[in-house]
Amino acid sequence: MRKMKLYLAFLCGALVLTPAVIQASITQLMQDFSASDWNTIKTAKTAMENMEGAAIPDLIKMLDRNEIVKVTNTGSLIYPGAEKFFGYGQIVDYDIDNLAMRAGWALEDISFMNFGFTGYHLPDEELLGFIKITFPNYYNNVTNRKKLEVSSSAELRNVIYKLSVQNAKDWWEEHKTTWTRVKALADALSSFDEKRQVKALFYMRNGTTRCTGLTKEYYFQHLAAEVVRLSSSETLRVSEHARFILLDNKQMWLETKNVE
């Protein structure tokens, strides 16, 4: 019963909880997020998103759990490890059978960042190109590049895993004392990273989890100009999301958010 009450609080973002209560609940959330049942995983992730930054340190620790826990009871979920394809359903572009990738999925959705975790499941022939584009500093080192060019697919995936984890850890170490989700949303929109832009715009259109400070006033002061810029993007999935937001003259998309 206590666990259910905490879940309802985090899912709805409706209660102000003390740090002690929040910390006490994180262990249970992480256990549920590491489980195999899809509904349990999804519910825990939503609860963690409603906690904004509170669960990030534990998710960072989870990045070191490079182990497989096959997701079950997935229904029509579409993800890299799915054993059945129904042609419709929720899409998760992460290899969430791998616990480290699962943590990366949650971290990137909470933070609107692109650390590189989606590259882990790509076809063999796309791995080297992904490393070149996503981790240019690593790839442009001559020694690294020569090693990459003769690496197996398994070795390339391991490189993507390690570099993604390091990106996430470095990011949190730099920003952990000042990070807020609403500022992260603004940073993603103003970035020139397509994946970050899409995450931010998709959240604005469809997200229901907490983003403290995301008010109508904040939107017009800090986000509206970037949405206008992105509405002219040559990338269709970016421009379409942005245009739909601009067409919503009454900002009804804010009604689905917990913003106080």
Image (cartoon, rainbow, N blue to C red):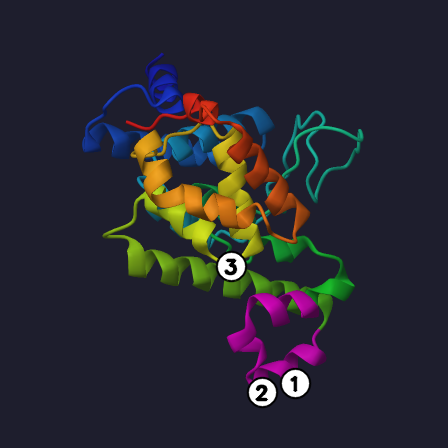
Farthest residue in the top direction? 1
Look at discs 3 and 2 and give the one toward the viewer: 3
Q: Residue at x 64, y 39 (%)?
A: 70
The three-letter code of the residue at mark 3 reads Phe
Residue, disc 3:
192
Viewer can see residue 49: yes
Q: Is residue 141 above or below residue 251?
A: below
Q: Quadrant of residue 242?
A: top right
Question: Which segment is the magenta one?
Answer: 128-151
Give the main secondary structure, helix, strand or loop, of the magenta stretch. Answer: helix
The three-letter code of the residue at mark 1 reads Lys
Near-viewer residue (246 or 105): 246
Near-viewer residue (1 or 139): 139
Does the residue at mark 2 contact the one at mark 1 (Cβ under 8 Å)? yes
Does the residue at mark 3 contact the one at mark 1 (Cβ under 8 Å)? no
In the picture, the quarter occupied by the N terminus is top left
Please tell me how crowded label 1 is: few (under 14), some (14-19), or many (20+) other residues with Cα within 10 Å. Answer: few
Viewer can see residue 99: no
Residue, disc 2:
143
Q: Earlier in the sequence, mark 3 or mark 1?
A: 1
Q: Residue 146, labelled with which disc? A: 1
